[in-house]
Image (cartoon, grey):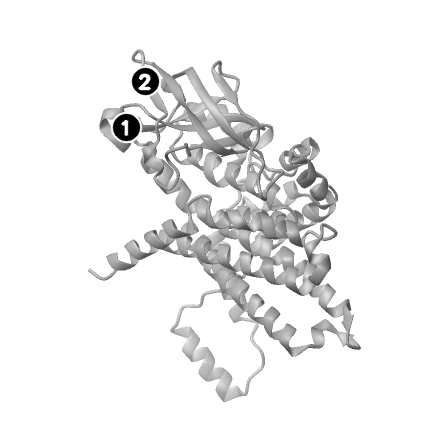
Amino acid sequence: MTFQSVVLKAARARCFSSHLQLARATSSCRCSLSTSASDDLATRHAVAPLHAPVTALTEDESMIRDVARQWANDGLRPVVRKMDREGSLDPDILSSLFAQGFMGMEIPPEHGGSGLSFTSACLVVEEISRVDPSVAILVDIHNTLTNNAIRFWGSESLRNTWLPRLATDTVSSFCLSEAESGSDAFALKTTAIPTSSSEYVLNGTKLWISNAAQAGVFLVFANANPAAGYKGITAFMVDAKTEGISVGPPESKLGLRASSTCPITFDDVKVTTDDILGQVGMGYKYCINILNEGRIGIACQQIGIAKGCLDIVMPYLKERQQFGRAIADFQGVQFQVAMAATELHAAEVMTYNACRLKEANLPFVKEASMAKLYSSKVSEKVASLTIELLGGIGFTQDLLAEKFYRDCKVGSIYEGTSNMQLQTIAKLLFADFK
């Protein structure tokens, strides 16, 4: 089954309603009980609403996950080590991402996308992360940040111009961070000075911009009215071919080496009012809102990394013999992997609860921050444990365990550091106790 055939089916129904249908189906498939106990149970359930577990997937979501898993194992895995060593993305992988439909997952079919749910997109990020988080972060940023920002706040002209391209052949970059604006994102210095009623000129430099080397369009946050402070921040969709844009060399990073992370300089770059995303001076609000859901995508990446580690170490523990028996037979080892699996499951429940809340249009910001915070801690712990349990071979490049160990660290840094997540959680928590 191709990804396209799956998404056509998935587009026919909303994920949340399908999720409720799954709950109803679950209630009809219970094990046999004694007549009196069964009747009593049925009576209780007749007056209480049923809900499926947050980690239970609809049929469509399961099929999408399986397609992504197969592509990651068959198409991506053979080139992972080569891309990591060379520090660059294989162009064929990028082409395949578009061909599979992974780059326009939530974009509506009328704009060339797949029309999938947010949870489905997160499942794809998770499955790709089990093989190479470097590729997953490209997919995640492109889908959860740029694509969705245009869908939510873009004018009809911007949607018609960019969504079909973003779904089929154009990579995007989210240009926010600068030398003096990391966690304090709204201290940015890049300006967009109006030169007429319909034109602005961008000047400034962005740092640590993911996907920069491959991007055909930049979502740029710049201040159109510095005197107004952060309320002057405005978002622009800027074609990468626009004169005055220069992309610097990729950073040499600890992990995610195949993902390009570059500085971008805007030197008298001319844009028009047609390029503005939403309203002038509302960029800071758009940025906050889109990063809130983007953090769920990062949590999914971290969960994928942890699962990728278990994919490596669990078979090894059953095969490796020491002292006349498999390492997996030692209670000390069993307890360690049991705890790792428990914490991973907790992270998964938190993350997919955030997904379901977001899809149900319920408050999810606190839960998203919790999911990102906890998932990044779990992935670090599981990656470290994996190397320890593998022993000497875990410290070599014979297996991908050491790569996962390097890749996971940034999970506690980008799209909001762990300390910033704690601050958000505490703020919202205290707001509940007025």
Residue sticking out furthest to the left:
434
**Nearer to us in this view, 420 or 287:** 420
Residue 88, located in which quarter of the rendered image?
A: top right
Instruction: Indicate the position of residue 196 as horizontal and vertical percent values.
Output: 30, 11
Marks 2 and 1 sit apart, C-alpha to C-alpha, by 11 Å
State left or right for residue 425 relative to residue 355.
Answer: left
Q: Tell how many labels.
A: 2
Neighbours of disc 2 within 10 Å: few (<14), some (14-19), many (20+):
some
State left or right for residue 80 relative to residue 197.
Answer: right
**Nearer to us in this view, 301 or 355:** 301
Instruction: Indicate the position of residue 55 as horizontal and vertical percent values.
Output: 52, 61
Q: Is residue 83 above or below residue 392?
A: above
Q: Amino acid at mark 2?
A: Ile
Dots 2 and 1: beta carbons under 8 Å?
Answer: no
Q: Which quarter of the image is occupied by the C terminus? A: bottom left
Which residue in the protein does label 2 denote? 193
Q: Amino acid at mark 1?
A: Gly
Q: Is residue 314 above or below residue 326?
A: above
Asked whether the viewer can see residue 73, the reply is: yes
State left or right for residue 109 relative to residue 327.
Answer: left
State left or right for residue 268 relative to residue 74.
Answer: left
User: Residue drawn at (30%, 23%), measured in percent from left and top?
Assistant: 224
Q: Earlier in the sequence, mark 2 or mark 1?
A: 2
> What secondary structure is marked by label 2?
strand
User: Residue drawn at (74%, 46%), measured in percent from left and top?
Assistant: 74
Asked whether the viewer can see residue 362, the reply is: no
Instruction: Indicate the position of residue 292 as horizontal and vertical percent values.
Output: 40, 46
Label annotation for residue 232: 1
Instruction: Indicate the position of residue 30 as horizontal and vertical percent values.
Output: 56, 75
> What secondary structure is marked by label 1?
helix
User: Residue drawn at (60%, 57%), measured in percent from left and top?
Assistant: 383
**Nearer to us in this view, 184 or 79:** 184
